[in-house]
Image (cartoon, helix red, strand yellow):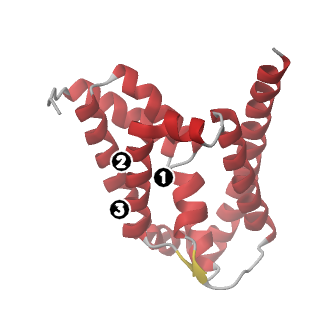
Amino acid sequence: MDLHLSIKEIFTAFMVLFAVIDITGSTPIIINLNATGKQVQAGKAALISYAVMITFLFAGDALLQLFNVDISSFAIAGALVLLVLAVEMIFRNDGPAGSVTIVPVVFPLIAGAGTLTTTLSLRAECHLSNLILAISLNMLLVYLVLRNAYLVERILGKSGVYVLRKFFGIILLAMSVRLFISNLSMLLNSFSR
């Protein structure tokens, strides 16, 4: 693989992925998952997300075609997972303790449909080595935020986290509905052609 390092491309790809992943905005969700006794393993989540993104970068289109799944259907599945998570955040359904690293942290929060499709789109604009470096930097940031989510909890206190959890639960619910509707309309339009 040729190395065509470009600070501009790395920065552009990093910022786009940072905005789509929005790991800092997911902090209340992580705190909520930790508060319910479920463990979010920062290193495992970052590594699996990295592996999913790199795999999807190289084989995403082919993988979805292999299972006869389009991007819209993939996004709708992610929206449904977000919907369930939002309802749980709003109504505080305390489930059994365990790990929640893969679902919902890796998918759809970090390496969801939006992130994976953005990664494929960036491949057309950035050299592969720059894009891989941007993904790597984002996963380092994801690890640091997941690892230190307790600091936010300590600063805000229990009542602050409670209010934040309810607020972001409603925001997440709205995001999942929007993601579901926009992709459902694209899917229905493709069938009507």
How much space separates mark 2 and mark 1, taking CA atoms?
9 Å
How much space separates mark 3 and mark 2, taking CA atoms?
10 Å
Mark before the other along the chain sequence, 3 or 2: 2
Residue at 52% in and 41% down:
63
Q: Picture coordinates of residue 77 (x, y %)?
A: 70, 48
Q: What type is the residue that disc 2 sits on?
A: Asn
In the image, residue 162 sits, relative to residue 120, either above or below, namely below
Which image quarter is the N terminus in? Answer: top left
Residue at 68% in and 85% down:
96
Q: What type is the residue that disc 1 sits on?
A: Ile
For this view, does 161 lie left or right of residue 93?
left
Mark before the other along the chain sequence, 2 or 1: 1
Mark before the other along the chain sequence, 1 or 3: 1
For this view, does 137 lie left or right of residue 188?
left
Label drawn at residue 144: 3
Label drawn at residue 138: 2
In the image, residue 42 sits, relative to residue 71, either above or below, namely below
Q: Picture coordinates of residue 54 (x, y %)?
A: 37, 45
* Crowding at mark 3 (Cα within 10 Å: few <14, some 14-19, many 20+): some
* Crowding at mark 2 (Cα within 10 Å: few <14, some 14-19, many 20+): many
* Crowding at mark 1 (Cα within 10 Å: few <14, some 14-19, many 20+): many
Query: Disc 1 designates what residue?
Result: 23
**Discs 2, 1 touching: Cβ within 8 Å:** yes
Helix, strand or loop under label 3: helix
